Image (spheres, rainbow, N blue to C red):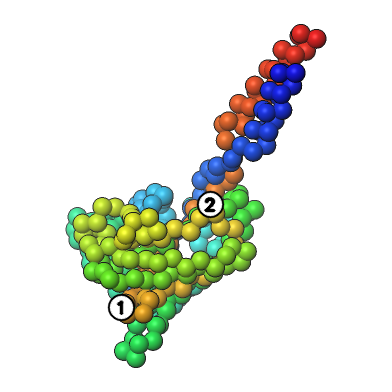
Amino acid sequence: MKLTASLSLLSAIALTAPGSGAIVSTFSVDFHGDFQPDTLSPTDVAGVIPTTNWIPAYGATGGTSGLTNTGIGGTIFVGWNGPITGTIGGSASSNPDEDMMEGYIGGYLDAAGAVQVATVQVATLNLAALGWDFYDLYVYSDQGMTPPNVGLITRVGAPDPVTTLNHLEHPLGYGAGAPGYLDSGVFPDGNHVKYSGLTAPVFSLVAGPDSGSGSTAINGFEIVGHKNIPEPSTSLVVILGAGLLAIRRKRV
């Protein structure tokens, strides 16, 4: 009786054990705007999830295409339009992370008080071809402006819900004293926002300030593809269950 109960419990654990995602590959774009003093080489590593092969996106408006870092999944299209562009500086001592955060496109509040938004379009993420079950999206935004400067960055793409994240830029700016990457969804101010567990093959980003704020930048973005894998606990439960069954057979 006790053995049967133990096996039932193990079965329940096996069915409800959570999964986790292993990183398969990444696709990353660095917006240069009208000028970026320092550029990334293909081997430079940058981003919250460190990755190479950042694709440069030049100018205020344009379109580019490229492959994932592993060269699988075909072409991913990226288009963009930024009413304003610029740079947050650059120095001889800068590192790849700082370089990526220099140039930007952005939305702003014009003289008439109307919000002019920056937009980014991404298509088409073929998750099956990429070997992804889902992906996380990191959008980098930092102009080094002193708060209050609350930005709104909206991600639109079915079947994922439309999500708007508030972004309060770090007053020091990345590379000018800010301690690395800070998620605006976790810290009072930061230099990126994160959207998790996405599956949309096509999505758009819309960035602009809220009422009374100056501007909102998009310095770059990073798509990190994940593959679901079972937790080690699931495999352990299966092994334990098999062992208990073997013991039960011997006793019978």
Looking at the image, residue 72 sits to the left or right of residue 85; the answer is: right
Residue in the image at 57% along x and 31% along y: 232
Nearer-the-camera pick, 43 or 162: 162
Which mark is drawn over residue 114? Answer: none
Residue 139, given in percent of the width and then of the height, sits at 42, 62
Residue 202 visible in the shown view: no
Residue 127, given in percent of the width and then of the height, sits at 61, 55
Q: CA distance from mark 2 to mark 1?
A: 33 Å
- Secondary structure under badge 2? strand
Residue 119, given in percent of the width and then of the height, sits at 46, 75
Nearer-the-camera pick, 127 or 1: 1
> Pointer 2: residues within 10 angstroms few (<14), some, or many (20+)?
many
Residue 167, given in percent of the width and then of the height, sits at 37, 66
Residue in the image at 27% along x and 62% along y: 170
Residue in the image at 72% along x and 12% along y: 247
Which mark is drawn over residue 225? Answer: 2
78 is higher (above) or lower (below) than 100? below
Would you identify the image quadrant in which residue 98 lies? bottom left
| Comes first in the chain, label 2 or label 1 | 1
Q: Amino acid at mark 1?
A: Gly
Looking at the image, residue 9 sits to the left or right of residue 26; the answer is: right
Which mark is drawn over residue 214? Answer: 1
Residue in the image at 59% along x and 63% along y: 160
